[in-house]
Image (spheres, helix red, strand yellow):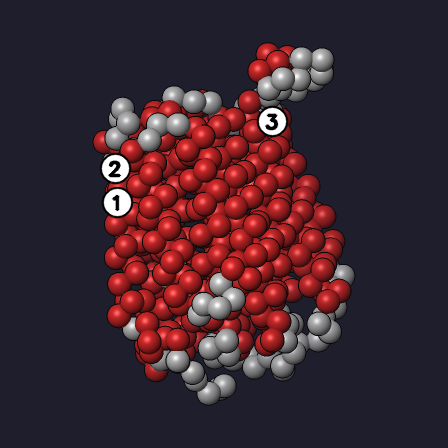
Amino acid sequence: MKNKKALTLLFTANAISGFAQGISMLAIPWYFADVLNDSASFGIIYSFTTLATLFWGLYSGTLIDRFPRKNIFLALCTFSFLILSTVASIGFYLGELPTILVALVFCATIFNYNMHYPNLYAFGQEITEKENYGKTNSLIEIIGQSTSVLSGAFAAILLTGVNQELLNSIGLNNFTLDITPWKLHEIFLLDAVTYVIAFSLIWFIKYTPVKPKIVDTGDILTRLKQGVTFLKKYPLLFYFGVGSFAIFIVVLIHIHQLMPIYINNHLQASGGVYAIAEMTCAFGALLSGIGIRWVFKNTNSVKAIIILMVTSIIMFELLVVTKSPYVLSFVCFVLGISNAGARILRITYLFNHIPNHIIGRTGSVFQSLNILSRFILISIFAIPFFGESNNIIWAYVIGGLFIFASIIPLIIFYKKLISFKIDEE
């Protein structure tokens, strides 16, 4: 790889900012579910934030294709630092954070996600040789999920603290450690500092595009239409791109919206279980990043994704018929493998079929449909019914059915998808 140093800096910056960001995104849903005992309000916030990102997702794709991807990362780091440092400062001043500011941080982070990851993959494609696409996507997954494992472990400590009773329960009777649970504004400050470090690393990135980037300077509407037009010309790519997104959609909702309620109401367990379950999910994704291409080396990407989708359905329905923190951790581990594996295979397939100069705009189309699907599901799960007793298990039934429906186009067009080719534009 001729841009190896640039990729190293990019991945390091992504890991550092993602570490504290992961802690924040675990702390906020648990804060609503356990501290405020108001999961319904969080569901509404999540729902409207997702709807807002529908429009942002369309616009962000045009920016990714229009401006240098390095500059976009610098802008995202600056924006995130300003939001988090301001909210953290208010928290230190007041001694606590108003709910509206907690919601603001959550919304800002979701907006960041919706540009950060499409930009990360587009940047990776821009500076990576075609034969190394799979390796680069796997590295993104490995590094990102390694960070998630660490952030999950730290979230478990920061959300619940550490005392002698906890140490005794896990057999560390002769070890003394006392950590008071962190407040949200303290976690947000840590998050803000990591964006400064990430900004510094990205600033020093120097790279040479593998192919000269074709910059379209037309207006936003025209650029949006070009992404749609490309997919109309190649509808098989549209069917694949939309159908293969299903695991990601349901897993994201599971982690941010459903799991805190499932643990609080169905399992009646603590925030430590939530953080550990998220950590096992990240660990599964880490293993997937390391070995998924080897596991499916004799299987085409489309078939492998179908297998992973079926596996995910089984895992979600397992949560319906069981009531155990250990089963939850196992399910999250397998979901981590399935979700990350499908994402690596999906993105590599799209990289091999969509030119880099239009990848952001076509990605916007997929991302917008992904957001719309999430908005509908999140809105349904925000209905008070799902927050009562253990009714949250019915959300997992619905999630499994959604993935099942998404498999259908992949099966119908299976033979055409595995032989599909386009000419480089």
Pointer 3 and pointer 2: residues touching (CB < 8 Å)?
no
Question: Which residue does the numbered mark 2 point to in the structure image?
Answer: 394
In this view of the protein, which residue sits in the foreground, 324 or 96?
A: 324
The percent coordinates of residue 207 (x first, y second) are: 72, 71
Residue 416: mark in rendering: none
At label 1, counting other C-alpha atoms closer than 10 Å, the crowd grade (few under 14, some 14-19, many 20 or more) is: some
Quickly name the residue at label 3. Answer: 157
Pointers 2 and 1 in contact (CB under 8 A)?
yes
Q: Amino acid at mark 3?
A: Ile
Q: Residues within 10 Å of mark 3 (few under 14, many from 20)?
A: some
Left or right: where 60 falls relative to 21: left
Disc on the earlier residue, 3 or 2: 3
Q: Where is residue 177, by image quadrant?
A: top right
Q: Which residue shows up at 29% across the image and 59% down it?
A: 406
Quadrant location, the N terminus: bottom right
Q: Is residue 191 above or below residue 207?
A: above
Q: Is residue 225 visible?
A: no
Q: What type is the residue that disc 1 sits on?
A: Ile
Going 65% across and 36% down the picture, which residue do you hit?
Answer: 190
Q: Which residue is mark 1?
A: 398
Instruction: Give the structural element (helix, strand or loop) at label 1.
Output: helix
Q: Position of residue 303 (x, y in %)?
A: 39, 66
* Amino acid under disc 2: Trp
Instruction: Determine the CA span between mark 2 and mark 1.
Output: 6 Å
